[in-house]
Image (spheres, rainbow, N blue to C red):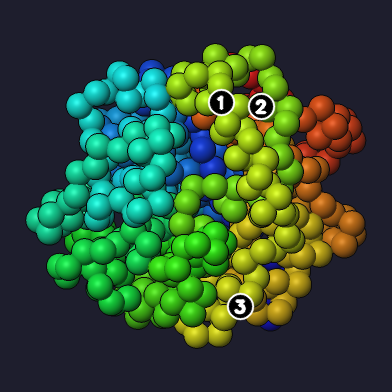
């Protein structure tokens, strides 16, 4: 039985408690203000007591592979070295920070973002295999635009080496560990999934062969960044895939993959139930009508999706998906529990965890070893101050996030990930006035949690 305030060892790195900020898009890019943006976005979580911060997905190559606008690339060692200011800021408050590494593969902007495709006409999508039939159909009707490049065996090794190089740069900059983006339809999930992976070489076929790529990434990270660097990964179970998708990673498959990765040496696992697509199963909740109607983002949506009419079609699909994937508290609980019963490394739970009472039940029941929250940090950058407040009645502590997704959809229009819902902002303001976020004295950096639009 574990408690939220108990420390946790992850691969030799001790976390001061079992609450972590799950990976989110910080939309910082690589420009001259990127490091300052990341400090502004991430330091409040450390300042208010969180045990671990997982910086959101960063791209391991200098070209292509971004799933959304504003993602930070970590392929340039000179840029990554500047991130030491960020890791120092987090460490000054007693927290730890891992960086998430990713390549979007078939999910990248060169597939879905019309403006990006127009600006990069020669850029192809890196793919595991020929795109599945359902996606080729979307290409034929003009909804997506595929110009795929299937990686040969040697190129798969090269891509894994890029993960290892970026991990090395990150560790040199002071990051405490590496988090592999193994889900959300990125290229790692594409290797794991029989929906995408139809390869006939050592990286395709059986579940063991499909797991080979992420194992190779792990080996590259350990060889280049050091044997004592903690490595964590998300592990998908494609239980949210539509019924017409017959080839997928089942829940049982996901558990088996977790067992393999624990045996290979991974230091912690994050089991998540997802779809084979990048859809609303990732951010379950309400249809973000306010975000789709917001005049500030209309031009950005049109640029991303090709026209105002196509934007309307995407919004309609988003509405339909919101009906399919309704919010469910702690929706990964069944999966994390099965994995926790079979592996000896820490199991991290995230997805729909919104109250201190839920956290306590998950930890006390052995469903996981640590608990992460994502979107609630957009609403409350200093959320840990309330969740970890020993003076509060735990059962009464809940996030102000309403799972409305008005924070996420505008990111397609190159907008920041911030809460925009008036009722939520009003609640946060009242809590701030009451001193709910004053658990730790501010250091002078990023003292305000009112992060407005840029």
SS at mark 1 in the image: helix
The CA distance from mark 2 to mark 1 is: 9 Å
| Residue 253 versus residue 29 in the image, above or below | below
Per the model, the C-alpha gap separating discs 1 and 3 is 39 Å
Q: Residue sitting at 45 percent across and 68 percent down? A: 246
Query: Image point 51% across, 34% down: which residue?
Result: 26
Q: Secondary structure at mark 3?
A: helix
Residue 183: give its label: none
Examine the image and state in which quarter residue 111 appears.
top left
- Badges 2 and 1: C-beta atoms under 8 Å apart? yes
Can you say which quadrant of the picture contains the N terminus?
A: bottom right
Q: Nearer the viewer, residue 65 or 139?
A: 139
Asked if residue 219 shows in the view, the reply is no
- What percent of the width, then of the height, locates residue 174? 37, 45
Please name which of the two marks, 3 or 2, marks the residue nearer to the observer.
Answer: 2
Q: Label for residue 337?
A: 3
Q: Label 1: which residue?
A: 311
Residue ranking furthest to the left: 154
> Along the polypeptide, which appears first: circle 3 or circle 2?
2
- Residue 433, by quadrant, is top right
Q: Nearer the viewer, mark 2 or mark 1?
A: 1
Q: Tell whether 25 sits left or right of 378.
A: left
Q: Residue at x 41, y 36 (%)?
A: 141
Q: Earlier in the sequence, mark 1 or mark 3?
A: 1
- The residue lying at 28 percent from left, 34 percent from top is 64
**Image: 369 above or below 172:** below
Disc 2: which residue: 292
From the image, which quarter does the C terminus lie in?
top right
């Amino acid at each position: 039985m574990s408690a939220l305030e108990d420390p946790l060892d992850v691969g030799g790195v001790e976390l001061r408690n079992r609450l972590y900020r799950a990976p989110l898009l910080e939309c910082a890019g690589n420009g001259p203000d990127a490091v300052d943006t990341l400090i502004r976005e991430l330091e409040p979580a450390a300042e208010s007591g969180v045990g671990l911060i997982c910086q959101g997905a960063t791209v391991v190559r200098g070209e292509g592979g971004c799933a959304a606008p504003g993602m930070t690339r970590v392929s340039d060692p000179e840029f990554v070295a500047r991130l030491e200011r960020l890791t120092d800021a987090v460490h000054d408050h007693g927290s730890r920070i891992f960086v998430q590494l990713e390549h979007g593969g078939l999910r990248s902007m060169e597939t879905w973002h019309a403006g990006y495709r127009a600006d990069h006409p020669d850029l192809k999508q890196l793919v595991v295999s020929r795109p599945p039939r359902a996606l080729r159909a979307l290409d034929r009707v003009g909804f997506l635009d595929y110009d795929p490049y299937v990686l040969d065996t040697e190129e798969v090794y090269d891509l894994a080496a890029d993960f290892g190089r970026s991990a090395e740069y990150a560790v040199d900059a002071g990051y405490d560990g590496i988090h592999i983006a193994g889900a959300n339809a990125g290229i790692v999930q594409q290797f794991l999934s029989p929906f995408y992976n139809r390869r006939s070489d050592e990286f395709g076929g059986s579940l063991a062969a499909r797991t080979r790529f992420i194992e190779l990434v792990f080996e590259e990270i350990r060889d280049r960044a050091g044997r004592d660097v903690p490595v964590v990964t998300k592990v998908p179970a494609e239980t949210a895939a539509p019924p017409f998708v017959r080839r997928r990673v089942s829940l049982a498959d996901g558990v088996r993959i977790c067992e393999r990765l624990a045996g290979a040496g991974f230091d912690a696992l994050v089991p998540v139930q997802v779809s084979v697509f990048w859809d609303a199963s990732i951010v379950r909740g309400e249809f973000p009508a306010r975000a789709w109607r917001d005049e500030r983002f209309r031009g950005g949506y049109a640029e991303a999706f090709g026209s105002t009419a196509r934007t309307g079609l995407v919004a309609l699909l988003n509405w339909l998906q919101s009906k399919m994937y309704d919010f469910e508290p702690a929706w990964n609980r069944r999966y994390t529990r099965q994995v926790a019963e079979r592996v000896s490394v820490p199991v991290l739970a995230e997805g729909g965890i919104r109250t201190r009472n839920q956290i306590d039940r998950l930890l006390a029941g052995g469903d996981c070893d640590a608990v992460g929250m994502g979107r609630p940090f957009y609403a409350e950058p200093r959320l840990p101050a309330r969740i970890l407040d020993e003076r509060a009645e735990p059962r009464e502590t809940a996030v102000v996030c309403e799972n409305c997704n008005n924070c996420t959809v505008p990111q397609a229009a190159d907008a920041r990930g911030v809460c925009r819902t008036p009722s939520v902002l009003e609640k946060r303001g009242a809590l701030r006035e009451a001193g709910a976020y004053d658990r730790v004295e501010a250091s002078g950096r990023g003292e305000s949690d009112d992060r407005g639009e840029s």
